[in-house]
Image (cartoon, grey):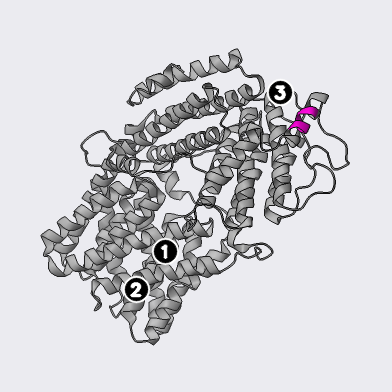
Amino acid sequence: MPRPFSVALPPWLTHALRAQRGPVPWNAVLRGALAAGPLLLAAVLAGRESVGVMAALGAMLAGINDRPGSRRTAVHRIGVPGLAGAAGLVVGTYAGEGLGAVPLTLILTALGLLAGAVSAVGPVSSGAGTQLLVAAAIGAGMPLPEPGWQRALFFLAGGAWLIALRLALPTPGALAHDFRFDGERVAVADVYDAIAELLAAAGGEQAGARRAALTAALDHAQDALAGPRLRRYASSSAERRLRAQYAAALPLAEAATALAWAGDALPARTAEGPRRLAVAVRTGEPCGPLPAPARSVPGLRALDDALLHAAETFDRGGKQIGSQKTGGRNTDGKKTHSDKAGDQRSAALHSNAGTNPLDRGARQTAHKGLRLRPLRAKALLRTVTGQGGREYGFRVALCYGASAAVAQALHHVHWYWLPATAVFLVKPDLGPLVSRVLNRAAGTVLGALVFAGFAAVLPRPEGLVALVAISGALIPVATRHFAAQTAVVTVLVLALVMVGGEPEASWSRIGETLLACAIVLIVGHLPAPGQRGGNVRARLDAATDAAHAYLTHVLSGADDRAARWALRREAYRKLAEARAAIDRAAAELPTLARHTEGTDEVAATLERLVDTTTACAVHLDDTGRLTPRHTERLATLLDELVEQRERAGLADPPADLLSA
C-alpha cells in the first residue's frame, strides 16, 4: 500500500506557523479594553488629542507585557519597561529637536547598543530595551506639540493606568478568597498538578516532557511569589500560607524527579496526593486524607515523607482536619503505610516537626526567600558585557542605526516607523529571525488592510476611539502569535495616528515594514566580530556552572535542604533558559543555525546530569551512600559532557566538576 504523500516543512517555516494555545484570559481582555481606549476618549473630549495618543501608546506597550502571573510581578514586568520607555521618549525628543540627521543616527545607534546588551539579562530587561528604543524613535520623529518631559509623563500615565487596573480588578472566580493573591494561588496549584503528572508519567515516554513542565511550573510560581515588595518578608497570612505551600512542594518535586529518573512505572494512587494538594491550594479548603505510597524504595520513602510534611503544612495554614493526621490515613480511616518502619518514620516526622532537615529547610525557604543567589551588580554587568550581551547589542545597534539612517534619508513623514519596526524584528528572544520577519510582514499587511476598510466607514474620531479600545482588548489574545499581535498593534497604531490629526497611512505603513524586514534580514546574516551563537553559549555556560554548584553541594553531604533546593531550582531554571535559546537558534535559516549545532546535545546531557544529581540527593538522604548505578551514571554523563562541549566548540567545563 503506498504511503500518503507528506511534506516536511523546514524548522524556520514551522516555527512561523506555530501558535500558543490556552483559554482566553478574559481578565486581561477586560483590562485591555479599559486601558488605551478610555484614555484616548478622555483626551479627545478635553481637546488634547496628542496627549491621548501618547498615553494610549504607553497603555498599548504595557498591554503587550501584561502576561499571566501575580500582581506584584505584573508591576515589575510592566513598570520597568514603562520607565525605560519614558526615558527613551525624553532622549529621543530632545535629540530629534536639537541634532541633525547624522548625530541623531549616532545617538540612536548608541542607544541600540546599550538596550541590546541589557536585553540579554532576561525577559523584563528585554522588554525595557524594546520600549526604550521604540519610544526613542517615536520621540525623535513623531510631531507632537508637547515637550519631551510632558510626553514622558503622559506615556508613564498610560502604563500606570494599566497597572492600576491590574491591581484593582479581581480575576473572575477569585472573589471567594483573597483576590490579591489569585495569581500566586494558581501558580502554586499548578506546581502540585505538575508533580502529579510527572509521577503518573514515570516509566513512560512522556516522563521527560513532564519533568520539563514541572520545571516551568516551579519557575512560574517562584517568580509569582518573589515579586517586588515594600517589606522584606510577607506581611499577609494568605501570602505566608502560599509561600509555605510552595516550599512544601519542593521536596515533593525532588522525590518525583528521582522516581522518574529510576524509570519504573508507579501505581496510579501515587499521584493522588499531589492532586488533592493542588485542589486544596485552589479552593482554600483542607486537603483531606492523603494516600501514602508504599515505602519500598528511597524515592517512594522520600515522597511519603514529603507528603506528610505537606499535609502538616496545609494543616498549620488552615483548619484542622478532624482528629486524624491527614498524611497517615486514607479516606476510609485505614493506615496506608506499607510496613511498621514506615509507620514509625511518619510518627517521627510529625513529632519532630521543625527539627528534621526537611521541615527546617522548608521553613527557611518560605521565610528567607526563594532565591539563594539574587542577581548582583557584578553578575548583571558580566551578563551585559559577556558574549551574549555583546552579540545582542551589536545586532540591535546595527539594525536600529541603519534603519534610522535609511528612514531619514527617505525624508518620510513617518520615518520613525522604520527603526521602531526594526526593534521588534531584531530582538532574538522574540523568535528566530526569518520567523519574525515573515510574521511581521504578514501581520502588518493584514492589519493595514483591515484598518483601511474600517477607516473608510467609521465616523471620526469616535469610531477610531472605539477601534483603539477593541484593539487593546484583543492584544492579550493576539500575543499568542507574532503575526496576530502585529496585525492588532498595526490597527491600533494607525488609528492613533489619525486621531492625532495625520492622514490615513495604511499603505506607507506596509512599505515601511517591508523595508525594515529587508534591512533586518540583511544585517542579521552579516558576518559579526567574534563567534556567532554567543547568547546560546552564554546560556549553556551559566547552566553548566549551576549544575556544577548543585552537584558539588549534593556530593559534599551537606544537610542544608533550603540551599540544596535553591541550587536545584537555579540549575533547572538555567537549563530551561538555555534550552529555549537553543530551540530558537535551531529554527533559524541553515546559515545561522549551523553556528549552534551540537548545543542541544550538551543541554540534554546537562538535564540528565541534574536529574541524576537529584536522584543521588534523595538516595543519600535515605541510605547515606550512593549505589554503583549512581556513581557510574555520573561518571558517564561527565565524560559525555566534555566530549559534547568540545564538538560544539564550547569551553571546557570547570575542572572540579569533572573530578566530582
Residue 416: in sight, yes or no?
A: no
User: In this picture, is 429 found above or below 231?
Assistant: above
Are the residues flagged by discs 1 and 2 in contact, CB closer than 8 Å?
Answer: no
User: In this picture, is 54 found above or below 580?
Assistant: below
Q: Nearer the viewer, mark 1 or mark 3?
A: 3
> Where does label 2 land, which residue?
154
Label 2 sits on a secondary structure element that is helix
> Where does label 1 land, which residue?
62
Residue 489 position by quadrant: bottom left
Residue 531 position by quadrant: top left
Between marks 1 and 3, how big is the CA–CA gap? Answer: 51 Å
Residue 418 position by quadrant: bottom left
> Where does label 3 land, which residue?
297
Please state which amino acid type lies under the numbered disc 3: Val
- In this view, the residue in front, 252 or 495, is 252
Label 1 sits on a secondary structure element that is helix
Residue 597: percent from the left, percent from the top?
Answer: 37, 30
Report the side of 659 relative to 50 (left or right).
right
Residue 639: percent from the left, percent from the top?
Answer: 44, 17
Q: Residues within 10 Å of mark 1 (few under 14, many from 20)?
A: many
Residue range of the region highlighted in magenta in the rendering:
344-348
The residue sitting at 49% across, 42% down in the picture is 371
**Seen from this angle, which residue lies furthest top?**
628
Are the residues flagged by discs 1 and 3 in contact, CB closer than 8 Å?
Answer: no
